[in-house]
Image (tube, rainbow, N blue to C red):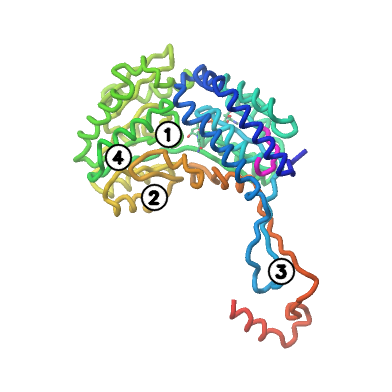
Amino acid sequence: MTSITSIAKRKFLLKKLLKTIQRNEAQIIDALYKDFKKPAFETVITETSYVVSDLKHTISNINSWSKPKRIWPSLLNIPSSDFIYSEPYGRVLLIAPWNYPFQLAMCPMIAAVAAGNTVVLKPSELTFHTSQIITKIVEEVFDVKEVVVVNGGAAFTQSLLEKRWDYIFFTGSVPVGKIVAQAAAKYLTPITLELGGKNPCIIDENANLEVAAKRIVWSKFVNAGQTCIAPDYILVQGKEKYNLVELLKKEITRAYGENPEESKDFARIINPKNWKRLSEMIEPSKVLFGGIINEKDNYLSPTLIDEPSLSSEVMKDEIFGPILPIISYHDEKDLDKIILSFEKPLSLYVYSNDKDFAERMLTNYSFGGGCVNDCMIHFANKRLPFGGVGNSGMGAYHGKLGFDTFSHKKSIVKKPNWGDNNLRFAPYKNKLKYLKKILSWL
Ligand code: NAD
């Protein structure tokens, strides 16, 4: 079976999935805690409730999304009835990352099934417990011909990529995204790549620093900083740097206590490899706050880094952990120099009460999506496309856009057997001047 043609069947499966996820919420929370001590509150807000809301939204809209959409005919074709049909691509391969292991496996799967595709879902091997509960839920809801979960690491994923698929949807790192794109090229398979990047967070002299500090601290340290759209580094107007740093320190302590290692609200780094990678980014002489590590538990405290050089380890690549470099700028030329020295990021954030400045930041730079006076919350609006540009990815999803991503849009023109304008038919002798006249009206 390559597609689930009946809309009623798709709806039935999604409703069953909704009930099964709701029934298993405690086990999902437990699995994420076992994988990297993700706090229950964070699992509910960023994983289970997000998926549940996505499912409800999809179930309520699937009928209208999947209906052939009638559109105005072209004057050249009149009389005709014109439509866009949404056709499932067929067999979809979904490859998911570990950082939001439930949500980033489930949401693309929901969109793919809603659009009528069959799915092979490959969750991350780094979140063993979450992958197990995902497997259990999918087995309970779907026939193996509809959706199947397959588990394995890099070599196994590469063997999957050698096969022929009708669509590949990948969420993960830039280097693996390139492997996926190369494999897809062999069969000209369409792909979506949801990747990462170095997301700037700009704070100008007109920003409300207290509000900024509170929102930045949550966005940077939720999931222990392992979020593709987290602010990667701060660019603060030099005059405001001291005040901002003091407010960030105060907010970190308010949120996670004097010793965040004891806080139940702060997750751990996913594995020793990533813990080591992050620990090596911390140059002790540059630490403004935090910098405490504990190898036993893959713990790394919320850390602020002072003015790292662009060639330092922490600025070379996406950080993807609870380390926040703070770099001061003098004018907009400095911003250009720094932001444009990196590939196009997945997100950009600007904190300012100066609307013109904020607008310039939004339009001067190319990035996936972003916010003014907040971070990350664009993700929560299902009516906004979510995806990167350039090195941070290609394609987008969420809400109806997810359904559209997994559908081929077929253009259909239906003609009655009458009403032909003989102009288009050969022989064309003496017809050109009439054709030109008609074309000039269009
Ligand atoms: P990753 O690229 O290492 O792994 C993602 C998936 O690819 C996993 O399922 C893994 O098994 C597989 N994989 C790993 N190495 C492979 C290889 N050599 N060949 C084939 N498959 C391979 O990414 P990750 O570490 O799981 O996730 C972190 C990255 O994902 C970050 O860069 C982050 O920015 C990005 N990310 C992006 C989004 C987004 O929506 N744009 C969301 C979350 C994470």
Using residue 251 as the reference point, say whether residue 296 is left or right of it.
right
The disc at residue 80 is 3
- Of callouts 1 and 3, the N-terminal one: 3
Quarter of the rendering containing residue 237? top left
Task: Please rate how many residues cluster around mark 4, counting C-alpha atoms within 10 Å: few if below 14, some from 14 to 19, many from 20.
Answer: many
- Of callouts 3 and 2, the N-terminal one: 3
Give the quadrant of the C terminus: bottom right
- How far is mark 1 from mark 2, CA to CA? 18 Å
Q: Nearer the viewer, mark 1 or mark 3?
A: 3
Q: Which residues are magenta?
A: 114-120
The disc at residue 365 is 2
Please state the quadrant of the image where ligand 1 appears.
Answer: top right
Is ligand 1 within 8 Å of the beta carbon of the residue shown at mark 1? yes
Question: Which amino acid type is marked by label 2?
Answer: Tyr
Task: Please rate how many residues cluster around mark 2, counting C-alpha atoms within 10 Å: few if below 14, some from 14 to 19, many from 20.
Answer: few
Is ligand 1 within 8 Å of the beta carbon of the residue shown at mark 3? no
The disc at residue 318 is 1
Whether the magenta-drawn stretch holds residue 222 is answered as no
The disc at residue 235 is 4
Question: Which amino acid type is marked by label 1?
Answer: Glu
- Of callouts 2 and 4, the N-terminal one: 4
- How far is mark 4 from mark 1, CA to CA? 15 Å
Residue drawn at point x = 54 percent, y = 45 percent? 396
